[in-house]
Every structure is written in structure tokens, then in C-alpha cells.
């Protein structure tokens, strides 16, 4: 597992969690950006990307 992949996954997780419950389009966009960053880190470490909608808990 790469350090860079872990950092991306962690930063994406935080960004997703901070914005997942906002109902405005800006919050939803930021949550998706977090999910995308998280997935980028996961793929670098050989894990499967998260495919569910941000905020669903899966």
C-alpha cells in the first residue's frame, strides 16, 4: 500500500463526510469530489473503488 494512496483515500473520505448531508448542489458536488479522490487512492492501493452514492454508508 502506498503512502500517497492512503493520503488520497483519507482526504477524500474527510471531504465526502463533511459534505454528504448538504442538500444544495455545491455540497453534493464537493461530496462527489471527495468520493472521486477517495477512489483514486483506493485504486492506487489495489482496492476496488466505491460505487455507491456518497453518504449511503457503504
Image (cartoon, rainbow, N blue to C red):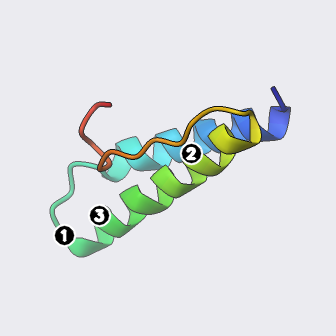
Q: Which residue is mark 3?
A: 28
Q: Which residue is mark 1?
A: 24
As drawn, is 53 to the left or to the right of 13? left
Does the residue at mark 1 contact the one at mark 3 (Cβ under 8 Å)? yes
Which of the numbered marks, if any, corresponds to residue 38?
A: 2
Does the residue at mark 2 contact the one at mark 1 (Cβ under 8 Å)? no
Location of residue 27 in the rendering, given as x and y in whole percent from the top left corner: 30, 64
Depth check: give the residue in front, 2 or 22.
Answer: 2
Distance from the alpha carbon under mark 1 to that under mark 3: 7 Å
Which callout, 3 or 2, points to the residue nearer the camera? Answer: 2
Location of residue 16 in the rendering, given as x and y in whole percent from the top left corner: 41, 48
Judge the density around disc 1: few (<14), some (14-19), many (≥20) Cα neighbours within 10 Å. few
Q: Earlier in the sequence, mark 2 or mark 1?
A: 1
As drawn, is 34 to the left or to the right of 6? left
Tell which residue pokes out farthest to the left in this image.
23
Depth check: give the residue in front, 25 or 47.
Answer: 47
**Above or below — where is 45 with respect to 30?**
above
Residue 50 location, quadrant:
top left
Q: Secondary structure at mark 1?
A: loop
Q: At x 56% / y 45%, what residue is drawn?
A: 38
Q: At x 15% / y 62%, what residue is drawn?
A: 23
Amino acid at each position: 500500500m502506498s503512502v500517497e494512496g492512503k493520503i488520497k483515500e483519507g482526504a477524500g473520505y474527510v471531504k465526502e463526510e463533511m459534505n454528504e448531508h448538504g442538500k444544495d448542489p455545491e455540497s453534493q458536488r464537493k461530496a462527489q469530489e471527495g468520493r472521486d479522490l477517495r477512489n483514486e487512492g483506493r485504486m492506487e492501493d489495489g482496492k476496488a473503488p466505491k460505487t455507491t452514492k456518497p453518504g449511503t454508508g457503504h
